Image (cartoon, grey):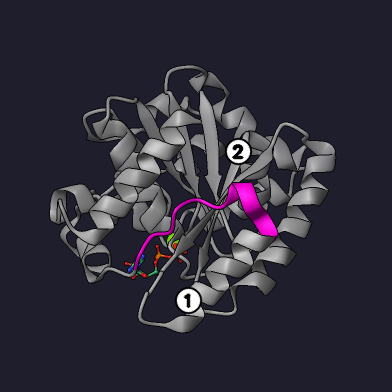
Amino acid sequence: MRKIVIANSKGGVAKTTTSVNLGAGLARRGHPTLLIDLDTQGHIARSLGIEPHVTLATVVEEEIPPQEAMIQARPNLYILAGGRELAGTKRLIARRDLGSEMALYEALAPLDSQFEFVLLDTAPSWDVLNINALFYANEILVPVSLEVLALHGVADFIASVKVVQRYNPNVQLRYILPTFLDLRVAKSNEILEQLQGHFNGLVLPPIRYSVRLSEAPGFGQSIFEYAPGSRGALDYEELVERIEKG
Ligand SMILES: Nc1ncnc2c1ncn2[C@@H]1O[C@H](COP(=O)(O)OP(=O)(O)O)[C@@H](O)[C@H]1O
Ligand SMILES: [Mg+2]
């Protein structure tokens, strides 16, 4: 079971878009996939057209098996929804005397090997749930927007990851995903080259800017449902194939 956390302490870099479409793409290719939303905004469920009646908060707080809170979104695709209740979950975890970084790991332990992929979408912060995600996952994928001063934020984030790695050597920075590539903007290519210079083998083929990608969540659909054949669908399909290969 590959456990991949999609993280970057910056907001608006396409963490949620990537989680949803990577998850949907892997599921479409036959891989049982679980998508976990660690954000109080709860965008994962809505992006897939689901109104969750139960969330991850219940799993952690009431210690019920995660299977009881999973919602099937598509064939092979299940979600553990996020949302406002996670604010309370964070406070609860933070109050633990011991092992607060392992709360998610313990809550999700009953899942083992039921899925091929577990993807964790995180909030744009360095909060207790995100730290928990890094203690649960094996792989980290960092989306980086090519529209903004990307490198600063990434460097800070990676420094924090290195601290976690001292305690959880099993989690590895595997992928840097450039997002919002706009070929008309020279800066976009410049930042892409900087990323490649810095992270070399970790940098995935970029996701181009695509209006379709921003429209799809409003229809509760993945890009493969909403606009198959669009730029966004092609780019995310390529991402899915790369992640599938490992
Ligand atoms: N490649 C893209 N082209 C155009 N819009 C995008 C693209 N990727 C994401 N978006 C849009 O940008 C906004 C931020 O993306 P989101 O995935 O929510 O970022 P994050 O989860 O990192 O905060 C959303 O409105 C999303 O629909
Ligand atoms: Mg998000």
Residue 25 is marked as none
| Residue 126 sits in quarter | bottom right
Residue 163 on image: x %, y %? 82, 50
Q: Residue visible at 33% across and 34% down?
A: 26
Based on the displayed image, in which of its 4 quarters is residue 210 positioned?
bottom left
Q: Name the residue under label 2.
A: 139
Q: In x, y percent, where is residue 18? A: 40, 53
Percent from the top left, x then y, of residue 98? 81, 38
Report the front residue among 226 and 209: 209
Q: Does the residue labelled 2 lie within 8 Å of ligand 1?
A: no
Q: At 16% from the left edge and 60% from the top edge, which residue is drawn?
A: 219
Observer-nearest of 223 and 50: 223
Inspect the magenta stretch and tell me whether residue 102 lies in it: no
The front one of 33 and 46 is 33
Q: What element carries label 1?
A: helix
- Could you tell me how far apart the alpha carbons at marks 2 and 1 are, in whole angstroms? 26 Å
Report the image quarter containing ligand 2: bottom left
> Crowding at label 1, few (<14), some or many (≥20) Cα neighbours within 10 Å?
some
Residue 188 numbered mark, or none: 1
User: Which amino acid, by three-letter code, is at mark 1?
Assistant: Ser
The magenta span reads 198-208
Give whichever of discs 2 and 1 has the lower sequence position. 2
Describe residue 214's horizontal placement relative to residue 163 as left or right. Answer: left
| 206 part of magenta stretch | yes
Q: Is mark 2 on a helix, strand or loop?
A: strand
Q: Which residue occupies the foreground of this view, 183 or 6?
A: 183
Q: Where is residue 5 in the image (x, y as percent from the top left)?
A: 55, 44
Amino acid type shown at disc 2:
Glu
In the rendered image, the vertical position of residue 13 relative to residue 18, given as above or below: below
The reply to whether the C-beta atoms of the residues labelled 2 and 1 are less than 8 Å apart is: no
